[in-house]
Image (tube, rainbow, N blue to C red):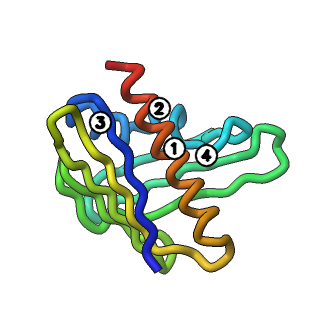
């Protein structure tokens, strides 16, 4: 099953693309709730390149690595990647007032669909707030 979330970002495509793919920015926006944070991020944005983010609960009770390999990169338009046996796609759609960022991914089987959708949407909404605060 595929899950899709999206957000509108009122910023130029160049700034949206940069913030989505820069480790220092990722560490600032890549969280689903205030009690979590991303402590490490690495990006090798090219086909075959690897990305990784280490997400941890701020109280130190839990953490995990989100790691994948880029399978398709079209600057300012899309990023496709594989993570485990799943696939994700990020589309950057230029619209009149900025950019729509749409993320589609294969759902996992451990957590309910609604929980996955809510978490990924929260992260994407944090991303939009982060970018808009910088422009």
Q: Residue 77 at x, y = what percent?
A: 19, 51
Element carrying mark 4:
loop
Element carrying mark 2:
helix
Q: Tell me where residue 14 sits by quadrant.
A: top left
Residue that carries the numbered disc 4 in the rendered image: 32
Q: Nearer the viewer, residue 93 or 23?
A: 93
Q: Residue 11 at x, y = what percent?
A: 26, 29
C-alpha separation, residue under disc 3 versus residue under disc 2: 14 Å
Apparent side of residue 48 relative to residue 24 in the rendered image (left or right): left
Element carrying mark 3:
helix
Q: Residues within 10 Å of mark 4 (few under 14, many from 20)?
A: some
How many marks overall? 4
State whether residue 117 is above or below residue 59: below
Residue drawn at x 41%, y 63% as measured from the top left = 4
**Sequence-wise, which precedes: disc 1 or disc 4?**
4
Residue drawn at x 37%, y 41% as measured from the top left = 20
C-alpha separation, residue under disc 1 versus residue under disc 4: 16 Å
Discs 2, 1 touching: Cβ within 8 Å: yes
On residue 41, which mark appears?
1
């Amino acid at each position: 099953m595929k899950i899709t979330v999206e957000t509108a970002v009122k910023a130029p495509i160049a700034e949206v693309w940069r913030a989505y793919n820069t480790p220092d920015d990722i560490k600032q926006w890549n969280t689903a709730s205030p009690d979590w944070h991303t402590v490490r991020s690495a990006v090798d944005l090219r086909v075959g390149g690897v990305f990784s983010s280490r997400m941890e609960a701020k109280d130190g009770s839990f953490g995990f690595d989100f790691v994948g390999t880029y399978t398709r990169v079209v600057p300012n338009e899309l990023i496709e990647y594989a993570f485990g046996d799943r696939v994700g796609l990020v589309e950057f759609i230029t619209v009149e007032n900025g950019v729509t960022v749409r993320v589609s991914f294969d759902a996992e089987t451990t957590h309910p669909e609604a929980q996955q959708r809510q978490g990924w949407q929260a992260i994407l909404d944090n991303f939009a707030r982060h970018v808009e605060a910088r422009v």
